[in-house]
Image: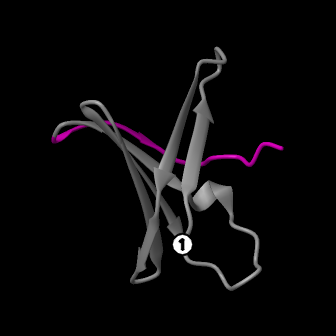
Amino acid sequence: MGNLSYRGCESQSKCLELTGRKVTCRQGICIMGWKNGEYSYVVKEPITESGAPTDASCTTLEVRQGDKLLLTGKDFQTVN
């Protein structure tokens, strides 16, 4: 599915923007992954019915440095 991007910002307004990745969906979950130097970012979301809005609170972000898990973020909110 297309060329996906991810943009996330922390409370101090530092933002990270990742582009150029595709999505893989299996067993009820869609996974999107990006690499930025030695860091990797994976966003996981449950599959929804076609046209149904995605519940951002069900989204998970994992940040790794090599094989080491640095962060798991949950309970996201959609920002317009």
Out of 10 and 5, give the one closest to the viewer: 5
Left or right of 67 on screen, residue 18: right
At numbered mark 1, what does the secondary structure look like: helix, strand or loop?
loop
Q: Amino acid at mark 1?
A: Met
On the image, the x and y values in percent for residue 34 come to 39, 47
Looking at the image, is 60 positioned above or below residue 40? Answer: below
Out of 54 and 38, give the one closest to the viewer: 38
On the image, the x and y values in percent for residue 78 come to 74, 48
Q: Residues within 10 Å of mark 1 (few under 14, many from 20)?
A: few
Looking at the image, is 44 positioned above or below residue 7? Answer: below
Q: List the single residue furthest toward the left.
A: 67
Looking at the image, is 24 positioned above or below residue 39? Answer: below
On the image, the x and y values in percent for residue 59 come to 55, 57
Q: Quarter holding the C terminus?
A: top right
Residue under the image location 18 percent in, 37 percent down:
66
Q: List the single residue furthest toward the right.
A: 80
Residue under the image location 69 percent in, 67 percent down:
54
Q: Is residue 77 magenta?
A: yes
Q: Which residues are magenta?
A: 67-80
Q: Quarter holding the N terminus?
A: bottom right
Q: Is residue 5 magenta?
A: no
Looking at the image, is 51 positioned above or below residue 72? Answer: below
Residue under the image location 70 percent in, 84 percent down:
50
Quadrant assignment, res 79: top right
Left or right of 52 on screen, residue 37: left
For disc 1, the marked residue is: 1
Q: List the single residue furthest toward the top.
A: 12
